[in-house]
Amino acid sequence: MARQQLPPWVHAAILLCLLSLGRAIEIPMDLSQPPTITKQSVKDHIVDPRDNILIECEAKGNPAPSFHWTRNSRFFNIAKDPRVSMKRRSGTLVIDFRSGGRPEEYEGEYQCFARNKFGTALSNRIRLQVSKSPLWPKENLDPVVVQEGAPLTLQCNPPPGLPSPVIFWMSSTMDPITQDKRVSQGHNGDLYFSNVMLQDMQTDYSCNARFHFTHTIQQKNAFTLKVLTNHPHNDSSLRNHPDMYSARGVAERTPSFMYPQGTASSQMVLRGMDLLLECIASGVPTPDIAWYKKGGDLPSDKAKFENFNKALRITNVSEEDSGEYFCLASNKMGSIRHTISVRVKAAPYWLDEPKNLILAPGEDGRLVCRASGNPKPTIQWMVNGEPLQSAPPNPNREVAGDTIIFRDTQISSRAVYQCNTSNEHGYLLANAFVSVLDVPPRMLSPRNQLIRVILYNRTRLDCPFFGSPIPTLRWFKNGQGSNLDGGNYHVYENGSLEIKMIRKEDQGIYTCVATNILGKAENQVRLEVKDPTRIFRMPEDQVAKRGTTVQLECRVKHDPSLKLTVSWLKDDEPLYIGNRMKKEDDSLTIFGVAERDQGSYTCVASTELDQDLAKAYLTVLGRPDRPRDLELTDLAERSVRLTWIPGDDNNSPITDYVVQFEEDQFQPGVWHDHSKFPGSVNSAVLQLSPYVNYQFRVIAINEVGSSHPSLPSERYRTSGAPPESNPADVKGEGTRKNNMEITWTPMNATSAFGPNLRYIVKWRRRETRESWNNVTVWGSRYVVGQTPVYVPYEIRVQAENDFGKGPEPDTVIGYSGEDYPRAAPTDVKIRVLNSTAISLQWNRVYSDTVQGLLREYRAYYWRESSLLKSLWVSQKRQQASFPGDRLRGVVPRLFPYSNYKLEMVVVNGRGDGPRSETKEFTTPEGVPSAPRRFRVRQPNLETINLEWDHPEHPNGILTGYTLRYVAFNGTKVGKQIVENFSPNQTKFTVQRADPVSRYRFTLSARTQVGSGEAVTEESPAPPNEAYTNNQADIATQGWFIGLMCAIALLVLILLIVCFIKRSRGGKYPVREKKDVPLGPEDPKEEDGSFDYSDEDNKPLQGSQTSLDGTIKQQESDDSLVDYGEGGEGQFNEDGSFIGQYTVKKDKEETEGNESSEATSPVNAIYSLA
């Protein structure tokens, strides 16, 4: 987990931004000004011959400048060449070859002139060259003959191209040449062999040149190597030998330099370029290269080693990098060194580049042009493209070396000056104009800008302005106070105000005021300070197994007025959120982590003003990669050394290696485990069996799992030998009564030890001393025929191959086949133990009648009938086994009160013998099974109906049923009640004692022996059982009964009062929606009321009677306005509505109507009618 630093380009951008703050003030384009070059091609302009040529030159000025060109310092007449044109409103040249022509004809040095009435600006001298990619000259290359261990250089010599081609070496089949510290390509493109080995003959070598503009690759004819050696066999096992060269008979040699030659050399490099030093040495063993600088250390921030330490590159060279460097080549035979003297020269570079000069009439000024270089550059001044010496004299101008001084300038002094500084390594050309203007101050940016900035950051407030004379600029905050400059503030030349560290109190309105002798101008900028975006819970480094789920947290705090965006990067690239990932506001979840998910994850929390980064690394533990490059060495008759290169452990250390083998004789294509080795080894000696054509592979194992098997090794066949073991699991068993089958487990490839594996099978009857019978068998079984029934045999099986016989085998006892037993058990006696079990006893049979191995005595029995005449029974035969040579046993799980029959037999491996005499027995009466289909129904709250069926197994004569039941309510249980019924009764009704309690019923059947298995059921729960459980027996409480009676009495009294009032009718004040006086014709005007009664002229429900006697439909039946909402309507304290219709009269007129009737429930009912 880490809070990531800002990338380097951000710091560079900040630096460039600060540098731009000191830039000279530019003239607005609406004012007259000399030309300024804004865009031009590079000095060395190389073009593709297949495209049109474009030489850029753009400029600005007022009036807009016109353009012309010179070629090779002579005027270039564009109008005379139909292929050449100039872009509109630009000086860019376009040379068109669509209609033919050779681009080479236009090579040369071009310069652009931009001119208006105030002066002329010049571009750089642009050297135009056409890219070239010449063909490789054809040549016939003889094979290169070299002695093993000798150095070798294969020269490339590519054709000269423009620009120089990129060189690389490949075989003629386009396979890259593997490079290392022994074989590598030099900077000049040659291929260097520090010493040649026999394996270098395995490929050829072709130099390839890739040309940039044409995107073509040219291939040189391939070199073929012929290596002379004292050890012609290319034994791959010697490649990793600790003393490989001695093992191959190659003489060891001290190092010597192949490039550069000798012990010393020199090199010149230009300032700002890269310095590349190279040392390539030969020797046996291959030398190591080390680099040093005499009198100091290598510049660690700029130096890096390349090409297996054979090259030293120092970037952006400066004068401090000059001096003596030396490379040291060493091996165990000795060392040598080569010294390289480095001289740093410099093309001209600016110390003080001339800038545009804007003056008011009568002002003084100067142009400065200072440059440095090695050798020291010369300076030449020009005005409007002409040497200053040949320009008209100007009394207001004085040249003093690298400075031009202007005094009391006038309008006529306007011009463009050029400073050209050069030495033998290059030149610099700068344009700077002198403009004389009288302009009052003006602001160039929009007014009243809003700038939002993050707390504690550095920021700047821009206030671009212009005026001539150049105005002075001052900043003020909130329209008051002194000029802002110094301390936390800094004002730049271009008018920008820098605040070095923003604080909350810096928020406000800033005013910039530009003033010169012609007036002043001002602008305002409003600054808002925002809280920074911060990740307060950063993602943490995690280690996860493949297939698991990972969550990376990223919780952010930010300014609420800014829009927050949270995104994720993987390995510094935008992360694609696939279907295995879920991105939330504060986390990233990865499901089913795979190896490709490993890497760094960066949470980027950003607003439009700032961002914060936090990085974590996810390590995925995966199965290891397969081992590779299996090699067999130390080949012996019974062993071999297997060596392999471990694959990547995928972040989980390899704990074991499993070596497997496959042979192509007995089980081709089937792999078997051979041995297992610790994960720290990559070479092991394997013990082998004779006469096996081995092929090996290796599997790596870590805690995550196993790798894929490696590619198989080459095959290795061991020599043969007689077998050292015999087959296992030898058995002799009869499959028929007159045979014996001898079987064994065949030997595998690693125990055969030779070709034509076969087995010598021997047998004879046990204890007869007869001679051995024998036969040779190629399979894994042999059947001996015409054997007596169940006779023991001595058996031997011996392995044999073409190299001889195996050791003497062990003797195994087998038996010939069995026949069915000839006799049945005799004197079978039965004793009844209880209603469900009997005891048996019998006499054993003679052993010679068994005719095999006695497995068991077996009883077959079946239920003949029940003693209950009407009961149907199944007569399916059942059996009870008594293993071994036994004389007694027990038969369980019988049905009571039944008649049974029983027979016994002897059983051997062949089957059952004859059956004994049939015996009969009767089981006594038992207890019945549970009554069937016991049902509890509750038709009402007073009764419960019970129904049941007779037991499935009465097991005797039923004498009746016993019912036990108990009432329960929650945790309260009542007294148990017992009911006895006759055997024919299957229904019963229970009268409930109360409507709340439930009942639990237990029912069982009886015989004379006793009660049988019981069945239990409960009565259904009432609908309000949940309430009843919490409020148990509330209905039986005295206070509850009294309360219910009081409520009933009050309701009755209320109904009587309502009925009386309804019958009498009543007078109630009525209020219209509008204050309309009652008409004189109204008979009830005296008291302001109407009589409501049950007569036919009563108003319809839902209507309103007007003062003229008509009936109006109310706008809304539920309108609270009609109910008196607005003042006179009232509510009781309990919320009931009691408002009545009233007429707005004087207090005296309405007092008589404010009786107790107005607040009674009856009035409330009528007011809502």
Image: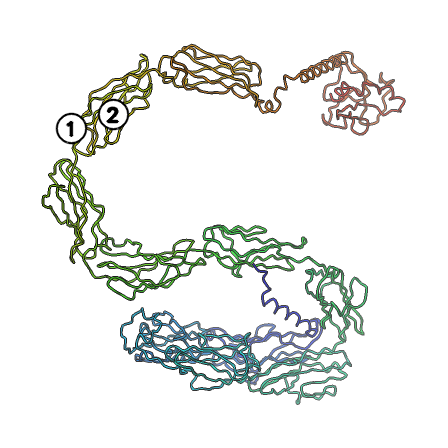
Judging from the image, what secondary structure is the residue with disc 1 in?
A: loop
Front residue of this view, candidates 368 and 817: 817
State the image quarter where residue 114 is shown. Answer: bottom right
**Position in image of residue 292 (x %, y %):** 50, 80
**Position in image of residue 828 (x %, y %):** 22, 22
Q: Is residue 85 above or below residue 1088?
A: below
User: Which residue is disc 2 drawn over?
Assistant: 859
Residue type marked 2? Ala
Tell me if mark 1 has few (under 14), some (14-19) or many (20+) residues whose alpha carbon lies within 10 angstroms of its own: some
Residue type marked 1? Arg
In this rendering, would 271 be left or right of 894? right
* Residue sticking out furthest to the right: 1148
State the image quarter where residue 124 is shown. Answer: bottom right
Residue 102 seen in the figure: no
Q: State the scheme by which the image is colored.
A: rainbow
Q: Is residue 890 above or below residue 625?
A: above
Quarter of the image with the N terminus is: bottom right
In this rendering, would 800 be left or right of 579? left
Residue 822 is tagged as: 1
Residue 929 is tagged as: none
